[in-house]
Structures are given as structure tokens and as C-alpha cells.
């Protein structure tokens, strides 16, 4: 490997902003803790894990199942 690289002629990916969108979302503490623990076990970021899980739901066309308290 080189000690340094010259990126002065590098070009930013023009499609990068189309790939993902930053949002704000409220997630319960137990749910967040679950994903953080699972992400740590798999050595990935918890936000990446949540995105992968949601993407899988979209690709498999899974619909949420709710259990409402009576």
C-alpha cells in the first residue's frame, strides 16, 4: 500500500443522495436496545441493521402484524 493517495481528481458519486435519505424516527428504547445488541453481535452498525431488516420486509412484501392490547 502507498503511504498516501492523491484524490485531487476524484469525483463524487452523483447518485449517492438517491441511495438513502436521512430521516428522524422514534423507536422505543427496548426495540432500539434489541437492534443495537444484535448489531454488536454481528459487527455492523445498528442503523445499517435496521435498514437491512426493513429492506428485507419490502423485498419480501411482508406486512406488519399488530397485537393491540384489549
Image (cartoon, rainbow, N blue to C red):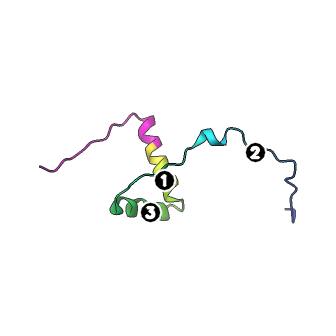
Residue 65 inside the magenta-drawn segment:
yes
Q: Where is residue 19 shown, x and y percent of the image?
A: 60, 40
- Looking at marks 2 and 3 on the same chain, the residue that comes earlier in the sequence is marked by 2
Element under disc 3: helix
Q: To which residue does mark 3 refer?
A: 36
Q: To which residue does mark 1 refer?
A: 49
Q: In front here: 52 or 47?
A: 47
Q: CA distance from mark 2 to mark 3?
A: 31 Å
Q: Residue at x 27, y 42 (%)?
A: 65
Determine whether, in the image, residue 12 is placed left or right of residue 51: right
Determine whether, in the image, residue 41 is placed left or right of residue 63: right
Determine whether, in the image, residue 10 is placed left or right of residue 48: right
Q: CA distance from mark 1 to mark 2?
A: 25 Å
Residue 5 inside the magenta-drawn segment:
no
Q: Where is residue 27 shown, x and y percent of the image?
A: 37, 56
- Work out which residue is located at the far left of the displayed protein and give it: 70
**15, above or below 43, in the image:** above
Element under disc 2: loop
Q: Residue at x 39, y 54 (%)?
A: 26
Q: Residue at x 57, y 43 (%)?
A: 20
- Looking at marks 1 and 3 on the same chain, the residue that comes earlier in the sequence is marked by 3
Q: Which residues are magenta?
A: 55-70
- Looking at marks 1 and 2 on the same chain, the residue that comes earlier in the sequence is marked by 2
Number of numbered markers = 3
Q: Which mark is residue 12?
A: 2
- Observer-side mark, 2 or 3, equals 2
Looking at the rendering, in which quadrant would you find the N terminus? Answer: bottom right
Please identify the dominant SS of the magenta region: loop
Q: Where is residue 21 shown, x and y percent of the image?
A: 55, 44
Q: Residue at x 49, y 47 (%)?
A: 52
Element under disc 1: helix
Q: CA distance from mark 1 to mark 3?
A: 9 Å
Amino acid at each position: 500500500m502507498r503511504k498516501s493517495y492523491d484524490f485531487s481528481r476524484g469525483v463524487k458519486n452523483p447518485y449517492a443522495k438517491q441511495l438513502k435519505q436521512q430521516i428522524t424516527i422514534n423507536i422505543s428504547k427496548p426495540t432500539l436496545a434489541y437492534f443495537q445488541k444484535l448489531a454488536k453481535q454481528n459487527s455492523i452498525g445498528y442503523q445499517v441493521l435496521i435498514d437491512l431488516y426493513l429492506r428485507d420486509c419490502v423485498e419480501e412484501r411482508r406486512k406488519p402484524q399488530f397485537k393491540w392490547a384489549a
